[in-house]
Image: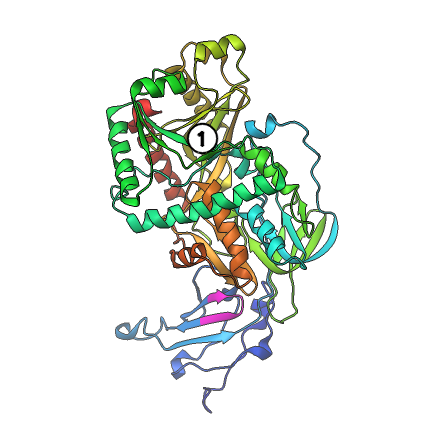
Amino acid sequence: MASEDHPPVRPDEELFAESFLIEWEMLDWVTLSSSAARAKFSALAAATNANSDWGDGILVRRVDMTEIHVTASLSRLPKSRKGEILADLSLPCRWTRALKVPTVHPELSVSGWFATMRQIEPAKTLAGEVSCDHLVVGGGWMGLHCARRLAELDPDSSVVLVDAGRIGNNAAGRCAGFAIDLAHNPRNPHFAEDITGNTEEYDINQDGLGYIRSSVEELGIDCDWSPEGKYHSAASENGAENLLMFAQALDNLGQRYSWVSKEEIQAITGSRHYITALFAPGTILLQPAKYMYWAARRMPSNCSVFEETPVTEVNYDAGRPDSRHTCLTPRGSIKAKKIYLCNTGYMTKFGFFDGTAIPLYTFASLTRPLTDSESKVLGARATFGVIPADSFGTTLRRTADNRLFLRNVYSYARDFKASRSDLERAKRTHQIAFERRYPELAPMGYEHSWGGMMTLAQNNGMIFGELGKNVFGTGFCNGTGVSRGTAFGKALAEFSLGKSSRTIDILRKRPSPNKGYPSIITELGVRLTTSYRLKKAGIEV
């Protein structure tokens, strides 16, 4: 409360007006609890995600778009009292800050999955003004299935899905195409004992797998769908030890698996490189670009999809019950009652969780189709999928169109983009992996090589829920994005419409991503770690 000798003071309008607007009549004016603490409140700092020191020791932190939280302490207090908290309060506000969104960088090369597709139609881009009930930003595994679920559960509403690139050639269409039920994490020494964590991951992934399966069956999507399972394969004794840990985790969960002998795995893959394997039957193999492309074109009728439509500016407006958020694009604008940020690491450029994303690229290569004579030399099963026993090893597939796919190498993605040197280094490593597995075929090289982004958090945290008034978001899968990302997006749609599910319950308990080290330190750490892990993986690469 204000006292007679210390009347309330309006915040400095000249300062805050440069950054964002606020309805001052909504604020309760207060004076801090001592005469020395009387100061102006600066709502300028409330427009930032990070804590900001402002004025005479006033620390203002934005909680969300409808409230600012103020903690006040004075640097001018005597040394014995420096840092003493003099006020701790929350004030309602209306945040209508226009936020410029950085450009999404184009990929260095086209995904091999997308490049080998036929009948690709031109992208439908947004031109003009559009209004909708639900706007989903990001057309990957999360965003595509969030939009589909919103359209299904709210059939009388209008849903808009936008992606900065082509759906199928975005990060979702650049993965290895394994829809996994339970990931193998040999980096975690307590992986096998983490029954609760593994059970929760299995349940989330099953939710995602079921939803993908329903899309394929109900919409007739041709994506080389193959429920043939996967082979966790080892080329070294260290790799074989990792498989024993994975088997223990499966035993603890009561999941089926079987051991595959050296002779069997070599017959399946046509490679003498492997010495043992564990077969896990719950995984689906698919062509990810085909699935994403056709699923986007067979959305419910109340869902509009726009590609090559990046959001360049967002204006969050949550001050009135009938207010709408506004997103600008290069050729138009979208007004939406609710926004769903499903753009993973790029979410941190939309005003939330700034400085938490650790963006990585992983790289893959795809051969041309094998000739009949080359297929005889290979002598392998028609299709198969191999997961390396070491997470820095080489993923291997023989595809439905008779190509060989290999993936390995991780690199830090400064400013959310891969470098040409990282791509060239990955291609050289891919060739070495090819020669180790198929020395007779390796001279043919690759037809396509590409990278795809994934986002991690330092604490393995993830984003899920309502980030601000009528702004929802999910992200940071920390790997295994096909099944998990699908479940995240589906659950976000259900959560926003008041539904409940086990997936929602699990995700709401997960920690949020924490703020990482400065980017220069993070990049150095990632590059050192990935180089060490790649070397340590040895012949598993």
The residue where tag 1 is placed is 228
| 125 on left or right of 34 | right
Residue 477 visible in the current orientation: no
Residue at the right extreme?
A: 128
In this view, 8 is above or below 541: below
Q: Position of residue 290 (x, y in %)?
A: 59, 33
Query: What residue is at 31 percent from the left and 72 percent from the top?
Result: 82
Indicate the position of residue 95 as horizontal and vertical percent values.
57, 67
x then y, percent, for residue 228: 45, 30
Q: Residue furthest bottom?
A: 4
Q: Which is nearer the eye, 319 or 136?
A: 136
Q: Quadrant of the C terminus?
A: top left
Q: Residue at x 49, y 10 (%)?
A: 374
Q: Is residue 249 left or right of residue 16?
A: left
381 vs 434, nearest the viewer:
381
Check disc 1 and report its element: helix, strand or loop.
Answer: loop
x then y, percent, for residue 339: 59, 57
Q: Is residue 31 magenta?
A: no
Say if 236 sits above or below 246 in the image: above
Q: Quadrant of the N terminus?
A: bottom left
Residue type pointed to by label 1: Glu
Q: How many marks?
A: 1
Camera sees residue 292: yes
Secondary structure mostly seen in magenta is strand
- Tell whether 399 sits left or right of 509: right
Magenta residues span 62-69
Q: Nearer the viewer, residue 340 or 426?
A: 340
Q: How is the image coloured?
A: rainbow
Q: Residues within 10 Å of mark 1 (few under 14, many from 20)?
A: some
Q: Is residue 152 above or below residue 118?
A: below
- Apparent side of residue 29 relative to residue 280 in the rendered image (left or right): right
Residue 429, by quadrant, is top left
